[in-house]
């Protein structure tokens, strides 16, 4: 994955390489956009390419030279990464001071010196303030790469000193084939992308084949129960398997989509577009009032199972008995 060139990065890559070729590469870049688009991968690819002794014509690192080998080993002396000591914690002022000192030394290999901050929005105010001077005028050939999914949380004085590189979720025509080649047979790339807000790496992280098989099985089981072909007591035994809370969130999602289908004049945007034809059948079979009652019951079931010591099997049996139509 680290070496992968993500297809939705290509335009941004080309633009930056053109600036580099023209000698106008900004010395502070803010890579900003939603999570799951590979901003950090892009930053590392750029750092590696800037440090490479023999980059290709398109600006890519050669992967062979001394610099590339050191980079891969995580020991390039002209490259430094600043991250919180633990996930979710802040980047401290001492870390930023060390970073500024690092950029102040002459590059060991005579090329760029590169600092990567990720996630940059985790700098506290002291840390951010101590970065301002270096950000405005990095010494020598210093380049700062700030990565963030929440640029609004950065100090305005930090943002204004960086050139922003904006990352947007790619078009489906780009994202779907990429994802389809990486997820198990039977998973629906379009649905995974919907759930992940269009961010392909986030969609890939969610594409656990086992979970999706369970979701399909429970849907099938629920259809059979509604048609009276499976006993609610037997069905409840299956619903209780695995992550009950997740199972019930799926159930709520299906009932929400059914109401969308019932109430929309135009084809609505569904959270479960792979189940559309079955959900439309449910919508056609019942009155709006009955559909809302079922959604309410599904939500109550979820709340009761999550917050009380109630017997989840009995609650599920009662809910599934009422689902016969
Ligand atoms: Zn190289």
Image (cartoon, rainbow, N blue to C red):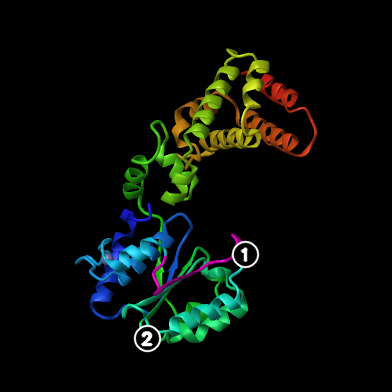
Is the CB–ligand 1 distance for label 2 below 8 Å? Answer: no
Tell me, yes or no, whether the two marked residues, 2 and 1, touch with CB atoms within 8 Å. no
The residue positioned 26% from the left and 81% from the top of the image is 23
Q: In the drawing, does residue 120 fall left or right of residue 2?
A: right
Q: Where is residue 223 in the image (x, y as percent from the top left)?
A: 55, 21
Q: Residue 117: tell me if it is visible.
A: yes
Q: Does the magenta stretch include residue 176?
A: no
In depth, the one of 60 and 147 nearer the eye is 60
Q: How far apart are marks 2 and 1 (CA)?
A: 31 Å
Dot 1: what SS? loop
Q: In this view, does 179 lie above or below 35?
A: above
User: Residue 89's mark?
Assistant: 1
Q: In this view, does 56 lie above or below 228?
A: below
Image: magenta residue range? 75-89
User: Residue 325's mark?
Assistant: none
Quarter of the image for residue 111 reads: bottom left
Q: In this view, does 87 lie above or below 320?
A: below
The residue positioned 73% from the left and 34% from the top of the image is 305
Between disc 2 and disc 1, the foreground one is 2
The residue positioned 65% from the left and 36% from the top of the image is 245
Query: Looking at the image, which residue sits at the far left?
Result: 57
Crowding near pointer 2: few (<14 within 10 Å), some, many (20+)? Answer: some
- Residue under numbered circle 2: 140
Quarter of the image for residue 57 reads: bottom left
Query: Looking at the image, which residue sits at the far right?
Result: 309
Crowding near pointer 1: few (<14 within 10 Å), some, many (20+)? Answer: few
Q: Residue 156: tell me if it is visible.
A: no
In depth, the one of 199 and 225 nearer the eye is 199
If you read the primary sequence from the N terminus, does the residue marked by circle 2 or circle 1 appear first? 1
The residue positioned 51% from the left and 84% from the top of the image is 132
């Amino acid at each position: 994955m680290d070496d992968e060139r993500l297809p939705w990065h290509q335009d941004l890559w080309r633009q930056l390489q053109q600036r580099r070729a023209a000698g106008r590469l900004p010395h502070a870049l803010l890579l900003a956009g939603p999570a799951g688009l590979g901003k950090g991968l892009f930053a590392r690819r750029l750092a590696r390419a800037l440090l490479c002794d023999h980059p290709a014509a398109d600006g890519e690192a050669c992967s062979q030279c001394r610099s590339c080998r050191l980079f891969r080993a995580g020991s390039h002396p002209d490259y430094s990464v600043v991250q919180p000591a633990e996930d979710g914690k802040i980047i401290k002022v001492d870390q930023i001071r060390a970073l500024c000192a690092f950029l102040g030394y002459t590059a060991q290999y005579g090329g760029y010196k590169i600092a990567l901050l990720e996630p940059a929005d985790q700098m506290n105010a002291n840390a951010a303030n101590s970065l301002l001077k270096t950000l405005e005028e990095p010494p020598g050939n210093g380049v700062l790469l700030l990565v963030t999914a929440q640029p609004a949380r950065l100090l305005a004085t930090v943002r204004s000193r960086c050139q922003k590189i904006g990352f947007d979720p790619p078009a489906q025509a780009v994202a779907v084939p990429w994802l389809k080649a990486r997820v198990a047979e039977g998973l629906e790339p379009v649905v995974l992308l919907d759930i992940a807000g269009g961010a392909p790496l986030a969609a890939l992280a969610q594409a656990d084949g086992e979970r999706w098989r369970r979701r399909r099985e429970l849907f099938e089981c629920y259809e059979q129960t509604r048609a009276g072909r499976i006993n609610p007591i037997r069905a409840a035994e299956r619903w209780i398997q695995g992550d009950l809370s997740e199972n019930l969130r799926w159930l709520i999602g299906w009932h929400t989509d059914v109401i969308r289908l019932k109430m929309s004049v135009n084809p609505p945007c569904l959270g479960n577009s792979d189940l559309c034809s079955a959900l439309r059948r449910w919508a056609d079979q019942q009155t709006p009032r009955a559909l809302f009652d079922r959604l309410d019951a599904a939500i109550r079931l979820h709340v009761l199972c999550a917050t009380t010591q109630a017997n989840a099997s009995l609650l599920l049996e009662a809910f599934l008995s009422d689902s016969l139509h």
